[in-house]
Image (cartoon, rainbow, N blue to C red):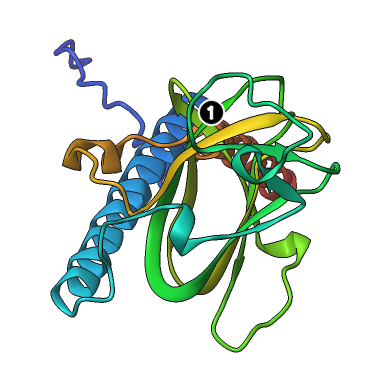
Amino acid sequence: MKDKRPTKRFAAPARAGRPLRPQQLLILAYAAAVIVWLVYVLVGSAVMLNHKADGTMVTRTLTADDLEFESFVNYDDDEWHTAPVDEPGWYLSTDNDPHIIWRGEAWLETVELDAVHYLPSGSVALYYLRPGQTEYSETQKVFARVSGENQYTFDLGGLTVTGLRIDPDSVGGVPTRLDGVVLNPVQPWYLRFVPNGGQWLLLLFAPAVGAAFACLAVDVFRKK
C-alpha cells in the first residue's frame, strides 16, 4: 500500500559567496568614504593639537609692517596717484603680477587675507615654501575661497612653511586696501568636519566610481 503521508519539501541551500548587488556595493563604498573622512579629520585634529601644544601653531595677524610688497605702490608715498578713498592702507598694483610676501616659519592650516579691491582683481592665489626651499613654484599653490565680505581663505591642510607669497591681483592698476593677513584664524571646531569644495567632489564621486569598477570586476570574474 502506497504511503499517502505528505512529504516535506526542503528549499535548496543558498549559494555561498553570492556577489553583492550594485546597490549594496554603492552603499558600502559611501559608508567607507564616510569612515575614511572621519578618520582623516580626527587624525588631523590630533596633529593640530600637538602643534598647538608645542607652540609651532599660533594665531597671528600680520600687518603691513610684517610684510614685503612687490609691484605695489603705497598711495601715501605716491604723489602722482590718489587713493579711491581718503584713508590709509591703500596700495596700487603696478603690473599684472604683484606680490605680498611674508618671511617666517610656522605650521599652518589656513591663511586669511582681508583686503578690499576697488576694481575686479581676478584670481587670488597663495604660494608657500617648505623648509629648505628658496623658490616658489606652481606645484605649491593654493587658490582662495571667498569666506566673507572682502575676506579670502587659503586652506593649506596643515604643514610647516618657511615663507608665503600672496598674489592678490592678476591685472595691473588695481587699488587694494590691505586690512591684514591672519595665520591660522580661529574657527569653530565643527567646521573641521565640513569638507571644502574639492573634498565634497571627492566624497561624492569617488565612492560611485569605485563601486562601478567593483561591479565590472565582479561581472568579469563571474563570466570566467
For numbered disc 1, what is the local secondary structure? helix
Residue type indicated by callout 1: Pro
Q: Quadrant of residue 66?
A: bottom left
Q: Number of marks in the image?
A: 1
Q: Answer whether residue 154 is visible to the viewer in this image.
A: yes
Is 44 placed left or right of 203 in the picture?
left
Is 38 placed left or right of 139 in the picture?
left
Residue appearing at x 20%, y 21% in the figure: 8
Q: Which residue lies under the disc numbered 1?
A: 22
Question: In terms of depth relative to the viewer, which is nearer, 124 or 220?
Answer: 124
Rendered view: 120 above or below 42: above
Residue appearing at x 28%, y 76% in the figure: 56
Q: Please state the horizontal and vertical placement of residue 131, each as a whole percent of the image.
A: 54, 84
Q: Please state the horizontal and vertical placement of residue 36, each as a whole percent of the image.
A: 36, 51
Residue appearing at x 23%, y 56% in the figure: 42
Rendered view: 65 above or below 213: below
Q: In the picture, which quadrant includes the N terminus?
A: top left
Is 90 placed left or right of 134 in the picture?
left
Find the residue positioned furthest to the front: 79
Q: Answer whether residue 200 is visible to the viewer in this image.
A: no
Find the residue positioned furthest to the bottom: 132
Question: In terms of depth relative to the viewer, which is nearer, 214 or 180?
Answer: 180
Residue appearing at x 66%, y 44% in the figure: 222
Q: Please state the horizontal and vertical placement of residue 104, each as a whole percent of the image.
A: 46, 75
| Circle 1 Cα neighbour tier, 10 Å, few/some/many (<14 / 14–19 / ≥20) | some
